[in-house]
Amino acid sequence: MPTPRLLNDSPSRRQFLKSSTVAGAAVGASVHLGLARSVHAAQSETLKIGLVGCGGRGTGAAVNATSADPNTRLTAMADLFPDQLEKSKKILSRRLGEKFAVTPEQSFTGFDACEKLMQTDVDVVLLAAPPHFRPAHLAAAVEAGKHIFCEKPVAVDGPGCRSVFATSKKASEKKLSLVSGLCWRYDLGVRATIDKIQSGAIGDVVAIQENYLAGTLWHRGRQPDWSDMEFQCRNWLYFNWLSGDHINEQHIHSLDKAMWLNGDEPPVSCVGLGGRQVRTEERFGDIYDHHAVCFDFPKTKVFAYTRQMRGTKNDVDDYVYGASGKATVLRNTVETKDGDVWKYSGPTVSMYDQEHIEMFKSIRSGEPINNGDYMTKSTLMAVMGRMACYTGQEITWEMALNSQETLGPAKYEWGEAPEVKVAMPGVTKFV
């Protein structure tokens, strides 16, 4: 389903901060979709779940979702590829037992698979396809009146983010729950640590260092009968139009915590550097293997580093420096200059389960959760950082928000794929 195109929306940063959305953006689905039965469900009512995107994360989300509420059933599934759909169905039929109720008639494949699933009677959808498709899938889900669990990130470019801002507002108006896959927001220890910081335990925060220094991820290779489009879609991590680069697809977790620590107020501007030092082969598409970005917030600076290289030191954590102490977010520790050390010692629950537990509770209670604002701001922050690295220029929040660069093809069909062109700082232009 094509990413919605939005025209002539150029809000100022001040207007954006006041409204937390983009006025005048129009989002619609390309098919007539029926409304879900209800936006509020009694405890005894079975909630039907549909899964869009049947890779590892989507399959895992289906397990988390059905475990989070005793009265749930997985009844529909959709994926671009038939073999991936069948693989996921076999796994889930074993894992879910009687909660797996997906028939062949409720199994959909192809570029229009999401649209077909939205026409079923599912109450909740889990959106876990590659990020490029997220704006259109979100728009279709809200139009159909479905509650949503939405994996991160939610877009790969400025127009996609503007679409999601508008869709999130519509979800709120329709009283639909919209829960983000930015899972650290649902980790109890991280919540307590950030609450401690924001309560003044280390004084005013002056700087944050975000590290997502990791190894490499999967690559599915290429089969002789795959077209260029199939090759790119099966290896979507490595193509900017599908993933938004790993600063968007993976480092967004770190950037989201930085945004959270800044009260969900976006950065003013950023500068960055990055490139391809190790993953230079053609099979790795057009993404970089490292980025380093300095974000200027109204009251703090955020220094963000991400790297995907084999054989290098890993470090994934958030280091927060205040006027009277420091904190390490994922270690759940806060230290003051006086030598006092606080460490979270409360209950622990899997954040992957917790996000679904809270979603279903909100549906049952009729008090919807809407994470649309922060999940889109954090995505745009990642896109903004990528723009700075690709162009070598300073990028402001307003530039990223109003960017006219639309990534992806004009139409979706097997055969040719978007051109693979690695960005060159100082040469690549901001659009």
Image (cartoon, grey):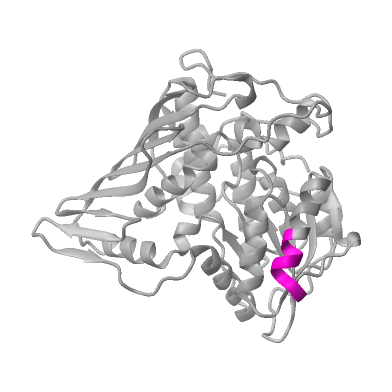
Is residue 18 found left or right of 234 in the rendered image?
Answer: left
Residue projecting furthest to the right: 105
Q: Is 97 one of the magenta-colored residues?
A: yes
Q: In the picture shown, does residue 88 fall above or below 417?
A: below
What is the quadrant of residue 260 in the picture?
A: bottom left
Q: In the picture shown, does residue 81 fall above or below 278?
A: below
Coordinates of residue 125 in the picture (x, y in percent): 71, 61
Q: Is 290 one of the magenta-colored residues?
A: no
Q: Nearer the viewer, residue 197 or 275?
A: 275
Is residue 167 found left or right of 267 in the rendered image?
Answer: right
Coordinates of residue 408 in the picture (x, y in percent): 70, 31
Residue projecting furthest to the top: 427
Quarter of the figure with the C terminus: top right
Residue at the image point whose x is 66% and y is 21% from the top:
420
Q: Could you tell me if residue 26 is visible in this image?
A: no
Residue projecting furthest to the bottom: 44
Residue projecting furthest to the left: 338
What is the quadrant of residue 71 in the picture?
A: bottom right
Coordinates of residue 57 in the picture (x, y in percent): 62, 53
Residue at the image point whose x is 79% and y is 52% from the top:
85
Quarter of the figure with the N terminus: top right
Q: Nearer the viewer, residue 291 or 2?
A: 291
- How many marks on residues? 0
Which span is picked out in magenta? 91-98
Residue at the image point whose x is 76% and y is 40% from the top:
2
Residue at the image point whose x is 67% and y is 57% from the top:
59
What is the quadrant of residue 315 in the picture?
A: top left
Coordinates of residue 395 in the picture (x, y in percent): 44, 29
Q: Could you tell me if residue 164 is visible in this image?
A: yes
Q: Nearer the viewer, residue 37 or 111?
A: 111
The secondary structure that most of the magenta stretch takes on is helix
Q: In the picture shown, does residue 414 fall above or below 68?
A: above
